[in-house]
Amino acid sequence: MTEPLLAVRDLQKYYSEQDSFVDSLLGRDPTSVKAVDGISFEVERGETLGLVGESGCGKSTTGETLLRLREATGGAVTFDGTNVFEMDDDELKAFRRDAQIVFQDPFSSLDPRMTVGDIVAEPLKIHGIPESADGESKREWRRDKVADLLERVGLSANHLDRYPHEFSGGQRQRVGIARALALEPEFIVLDEPVSALDVSVQAQVLNLLDDLQEEFGLTYLFIAHDLSVVRHICDRVAVMYLGNVVELGPTDELFESPKHPYTKALLESVPRPSTAEHGRRVEALSGDVPSPRNPPSGCRFRTRCPQVIPPDDLDIEQETYRAVMDLRDALAVGDVNPDHIWDAADPDRADTEAFIEEARARHIDGELRGEVAGVVDTALGHLAEGEPDRAAETLRERFESPCETQRPAVGDASHPAACHLYEGSDEVTVIGTTAGAAAEADD
Amino acid sequence: MADTILSVRDLSTRFFTEEGQVNAVENVSFDVEDGEIFGIVGESGSGKSVTALSVIDLIESPGRVTQGEIWYRNADLAEEFRGSKPEAVDGDLVDIRRLPKGVRRSLRGPSFSMVFQDPMSSFNPSITVGEQIAEAVEVQRRARSNPRSTRSRTQGYGLGSLLVDSLLPSKSYVDDESMDRAVELLDQVGIPDPEDRADEYPHQFSGGMLQRAMIAQALAGEPDILIADEPTTALDVTIQAQILNLLRDLQEQEGMSILMITHDLGVIARMCDRVGVMYAGEVVERGPLADIFENPVHPYTQGLLGSIPDVDDPSGRLEPISGNVPSLLDSEMPDACYFADRCPKAMTDCLTRIPEYELDGRHSVRCVLAEQEYDPADAVDSADATDAADQEVSADD
Ligand SMILES: Nc1ncnc2c1ncn2[C@@H]1O[C@H](COP(=O)(O)OP(=O)(O)O)[C@@H](O)[C@H]1O
Ligand code: SF4
Ligand code: SF4
Ligand SMILES: [Mg+2]
């Protein structure tokens, strides 16, 4: 296999955030937001790699950090064999020509005071292009070039002297694409390039991107949250969750046989525009995405994962286990107020049995049996006494999941998934990565 | 066939702006039946939100509903106005546009309620979520115990702070009973630990949780019709799935009807029984879900369906609609089918205003293809189909 155009290794980007003025006065450590936390992938020449995930999972940060538009916290990015983070001035200048970005918002990403012609010509000017132009002025050369670019993206050369506000969203996105093409790049990061567009116009722009890729042999990193768009345009797809890549594979394979429970949930959630969709009830993931300020230990997805793995020696149904884990998480963050349970169970706060029954009814659907029932009731007993931490600890002792003590690593096979359910299977060889494979102890 | 709870006829809404008259909604008609979810789908600016706001009487200056009837089934109101306003009553139906302002306003809550796209801007940031819901409960309780008086008292409230940002000190209007009901509502919409969450402020809620809270607030008046305007557009797809499940459950439990507005044909397919497709302020096609998705007649409906990539099938090139979403400035609206400048089947017969054709009792379309085959010999160059000034800036594939 030829060398990939772009290789990302253990990329990290933490944003630091001083919690408050007082914190900074006291010199407290800023909390860091682990926006991208040790991700690796490669982009082959001429392909489109999709980066998909929900808002805030680190897609845009990834795109901007690998282009060195933001400073990385750790890791390496290699473009065409050279480490991007260690480039000298000349190398960086060349990189800034070869790698471009198109942003999501066609309304704010273009300078409203510049004509479309100047916007598209700007990168040429900055890079001193052309070095010389025979027979005409450099300015004329650039004007011709821009006129040509505008036509390439489906606008007219007559639009040169117009301002962005005179264009619709789809047309502005075309202007952004023309500007990205001006320096004849090899690689373009497309950050949600069609998300702000209406579907009829979105389809025009997707077709345009397809055509340009073919015409100029471009390599794309296509960032999106819309899975249908990703399926349509990408050759391979990386799925991100909370700063991690959780699954990566060829598009058809990933969509037809998703491995990671998160990918499965995403695909299951997408509403299909067909009559067969009518009344379909999705087994929706519970809860919200946790904050990247304080991500869960082990597998980032474990707080919502419907397949979270119970301890080996515990006999428990999957759904019950999920419910117990949810209860435990809620106890640990102080989200279960025993007062309300007492109010409903026994306002005199005497009948612990009634308390336990009420608490169970609120948090766990269905029957509990045997050992599981015993441990849960002991924990709820602690809660009744006003000791939620002790309740959480009691649950942790017996119910601790390998998913919380061990961070699953992304394998290096053609379709890896960062999930303990796939570890040790033949198709995945786990590789050690500094940020990824290290077991993290639960604190 | 189920009874009709809402019947909108020939509704037009205009905005009289500095740039000129905007025909945001034009001769729109549709029915919502008991217990159904009726969907309105269309691209941005097609008039979906304005249609909803017109129904619930929230169009503000420079906008005005300029024509049309909004028939709502309510036996009590019909009885009340049969004598004094016979023209506003037809059986159990009343044309709410002809009711006095105060009466009409009092329908917000117990009759119509609304959920918006952006929950963050729909809550007052400085009042707890519980209080804001309790306030809506309070307004409804007063309405029930003394309908006459509340009609004046609810002025300025709308649906509590859901619809009107009340400047009155809210505390004084919220008693324990309303607060208990607010907690119950939060519980009903799936907010864990509702007693504590009720005391939190909007910024302490995630987007999905706040959307649930807004739904709870909308349920306070036990509405007959819940209008949901892009209720999941601001949410991620896994959270969207939760909210769609919730809306369906509530619809079944409460037996209410939902008017669901979205640009997402997938959401329409999952949720709606019947659909109206809007383009340039008009409903261009309307019918049961299967008719719209499997037998679309209007080239715009067809184009919309052809534009969406299929998450289950990557093959094939997308077939976008050429050109751009039109402006709705009256001065730029052609005396032709509004879609003619983008329509691949535009013919000479399309160069006049097109009426709504009934295909069968349930499926109607605003397109000449309802009555005639496409005839290439009769085709007009789409550029001729409109003299709109925006033609010259439009870029097609
Ligand atoms: N307050 C207003 N003032 C002027 N024009 C408006 C106002 N609200 C909406 N419009 C116009 O009405 C048309 C329909 O808008 P809207 O109903 O919001 O569309 P949709 O909900 O389908 O995106 C658009 O042209 C929009 O610009
Ligand atoms: S590692 Fe565990 S929690 Fe994470 S996705 Fe796999 S099964 Fe779920
Ligand atoms: S009336 Fe004519 S122009 Fe309009 S949608 Fe139908 S075929 Fe196309
Ligand atoms: Mg809208």
Image (cartoon, coloured by chain):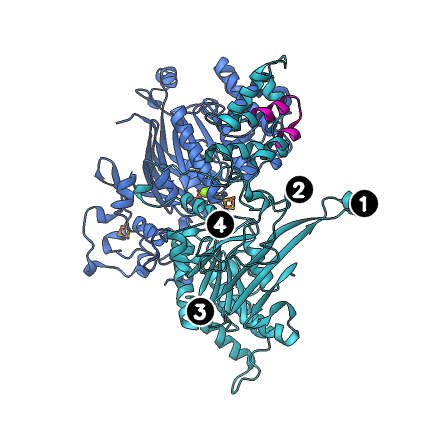
Tell me the SS state at disc 1: loop
Residue beneath label 1, please? A26
Which of pointers 2 and 1 lies earlier in the amino acid sequence? 1
Please state which of residues B76 and A46 is positioned toward the viewer in this rendering: A46
C-alpha gap between disc 3 and disc 1 = 52 Å
Residue beneath label 3, please? A46
Q: Main secondary structure of the magenta part?
A: helix
Chain blue in the figure, letter: B
Span highlighted in magenta in the image: A376-392
C-alpha gap between disc 1 and disc 4 = 55 Å
Looking at the rendered structure, the kind of residue marked 1 is Leu
Circle 3/circle 4 CB separation < 8 Å = no
Write down the chain letter for disc 3. A
Q: Which is more foreground, mark 3 or mark 2?
A: 2
Which of pointers 3 and 1 lies earlier in the amino acid sequence? 1
Tell me the SS state at disc 4: loop
Residue beneath label 4, please? B19
Q: Which is more foreground, mark 2 or mark 1?
A: 2
Tell me the SS state at disc 2: loop
Crowd rating for badge 3 (residues with CA inside 10 Å; few <14, some 14–19, many 20+)? some
Q: Position of residue B51 (x, y in %)?
A: 41, 38
Looking at the rendered structure, the kind of residue marked 2 is Asp
| Rendered image: mark on residue A443 | 2
C-alpha gap between disc 4 and disc 2 = 62 Å
Crowd rating for badge 2 (residues with CA inside 10 Å; few <14, some 14–19, many 20+)? few
Residue at (44, 44) in percent of width and height: A265
Q: Position of residue B355 (x, y in %)?
A: 27, 43
Circle 3/circle 2 CB separation < 8 Å = no
Which tint is chain A?
cyan
Write down the chain letter for disc 4. B
Q: Does the magenta portion include A378?
A: yes
